[in-house]
């Protein structure tokens, strides 16, 4: 029974890691498209939204710094 649960959790973890990798690639593509083409119909305001998140983290001082550190650690 333990092996089945371990395999299920490993499979779910691998799925989440794969989806996260795909989403990071799409965000990077959106940032590049926003820089090159401006606001596009497909990616919307990815660059503006990303800058808003960074500004919000910066405005929150040490809490924002901690959240940024946690996010960076999760995306490794």
Image (cartoon, grey):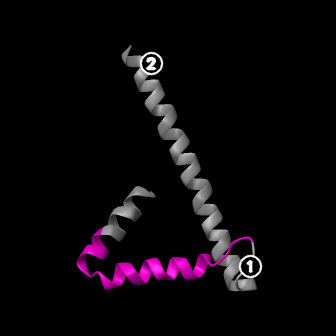
- Res 46 → quadrant: bottom right
Q: Is residue 59 magenta?
A: yes
Position of residue 24 in the picture relative to residue 29 (left or right): left
Q: Is residue 69 above or below residue 18?
A: below
Q: Is residue 49 above or below residue 12?
A: below
- Res 55 → quadrant: bottom left
Badge 2 density bin: few <14, some 14–19, many ≥20, Cα 10 Å? few
Q: Residue at x 71, y 77 (%)?
A: 33
Mark 1 highlights which residue? 40
Q: Residue at x 74, y 79 (%)?
A: 40
Q: Residue furthest top?
A: 1
Q: Residue at x 25, y 74 (%)?
A: 63
Q: Position of residue 58 (x, y in %)?
A: 35, 83
Q: Which quadrant does the N terminus fall into?
A: top left
Q: Is residue 74 above or below residue 2?
A: below
Q: Secondary structure at mark 1?
A: loop
Badge 1 density bin: few <14, some 14–19, many ≥20, Cα 10 Å? few
Mark 2 highlights which residue? 4
Q: Is residue 25 magenta?
A: no
Q: Are marks 2 and 1 in contact (CB under 8 Å)?
A: no
Q: Position of residue 52 (x, y in %)?
A: 47, 81
Q: Residue at x 41, y 25 (%)?
A: 6
Q: Which secondary structure class fits the magenta region best?
A: helix
Q: Which residues are magenta?
A: 42-66
Q: Position of residue 69 (x, y in %)?
A: 33, 67
Q: Residue furthest left?
A: 62
* Residue 69 or residue 42, whichever sits in front: 42
Q: Secondary structure at mark 2?
A: helix
Q: Position of residue 36 (x, y in %)?
A: 73, 84
Q: Is residue 12 above or below residue 53?
A: above
């Amino acid at each position: 029974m333990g092996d089945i649960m371990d395999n299920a959790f490993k499979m779910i973890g691998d799925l989440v890691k794969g989806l996260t990798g795909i989403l990071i690639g799409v965000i990077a593509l959106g940032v590049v498209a926003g820089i090159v083409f401006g606001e596009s119909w497909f990616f919307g305001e990815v660059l503006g939204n990303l800058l808003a998140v960074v500004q919000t983290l910066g405005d929150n001082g040490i809490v924002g710094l901690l959240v940024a550190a946690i996010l960076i650690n999760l995306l490794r």
